[in-house]
Each structure stands twice: as C-alpha cells, then as structure tokens.
Amino acid sequence: MPTFDFECKKCGHRFSEFVSIKNKDKVTCPECGGSVQQLFTGFLYISKGSSSSGSSSCGSCSGGSCSTCGL
Ligand SMILES: [Zn+2]
C-alpha cells in the first residue's frame, strides 16, 4: 500500500499515512481533526523518472528493484 503525504489546511501539520486510494479523501489531521490536502511531491518525482527511461531519479540504482525510487 502506498504512503501518501498530507498537509492540514487548518494548522499546517504535515504527516504521511498508509491509506488506500479509495479512502484518502477521508483522511483528517491527527492533530486538530481538520481537513487535509494531499502533497504530491514524491509522487510526481517518481512519475517523471519512470517516463524517461534510462535516467534514474535516485542515482543509486539502474532501474531495477530499488526501494528508494521505486523503479
Ligand atoms: Zn491540523
């Protein structure tokens, strides 16, 4: 299951949570219970790396099974 990063719209608290795609709209801030928005930083980076074949995004793998970049 992928980890998603969220930021609270109320208090700005950032956290990562294991949640299925179906339920990620139901995630609330663990600090204040406010609504959160999803942060796409790591997600976008991985998508870019996999679209351009050959260039690794993390530099420590050659496109095989890498726990850092997920390629
Ligand atoms: Zn909050």
Image: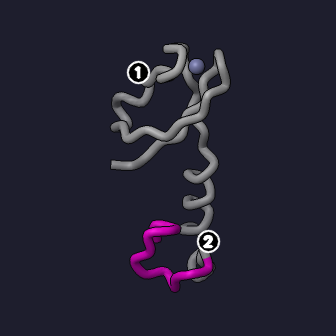
Span colored in magenta = 59-71
Q: Is residue 17 left or right of residue 56?
A: left
Provide the secondary structure element on which disc 2 rests.
loop
Rendering quadrant holding ligand 1: top right
Ligand 1: does it lie within 8 Å of the C-beta at label 1? no
Q: Give the amino acid type for the residue marked by disc 1 in the picture.
A: Lys
Q: Camera-side residue: 49 or 26?
A: 26
Looking at the image, which residue is at 59% across and 53% down? 42
Q: Camera-side residue: 13 or 40?
A: 13
Instruction: Give the spatial CA distance, label 2 vs label 1.
Output: 31 Å
Residue 3 counted in the magenta span? no
Which residue in the protein does label 2 denote? Answer: 57
What is the number of callouts on the image? 2
Earlier residue among tags 2 and 1? 1
Q: Quadrant of residue 57?
A: bottom right
The secondary structure that most of the magenta stretch takes on is loop
Provide the secondary structure element on which disc 1 rests.
helix
Which mark, by number, is residue 26? 1
- Measured as percent of width and height from the top left, residue 68 is found at 50, 68
Q: Quadrant of residue 64?
A: bottom left
Q: Residues within 10 Å of mark 1 (few under 14, many from 20)?
A: few
Q: Quadrant of residue 17?
A: top left
Q: Camera-side residue: 33 or 47?
A: 33
Looking at the image, which residue is at 60% across and 43% down? 40
Q: Please say if 59 is above or below 6.
A: below
What colour scheme governs how the chains and residues are painted in the rendered image of this protein? one colour
Q: Give the amino acid type for the residue marked by disc 2 in the picture.
A: Ser
- Measured as percent of width and height from the top left, residue 6 is found at 55, 34
Q: Residues within 10 Å of mark 2 (few under 14, many from 20)?
A: many
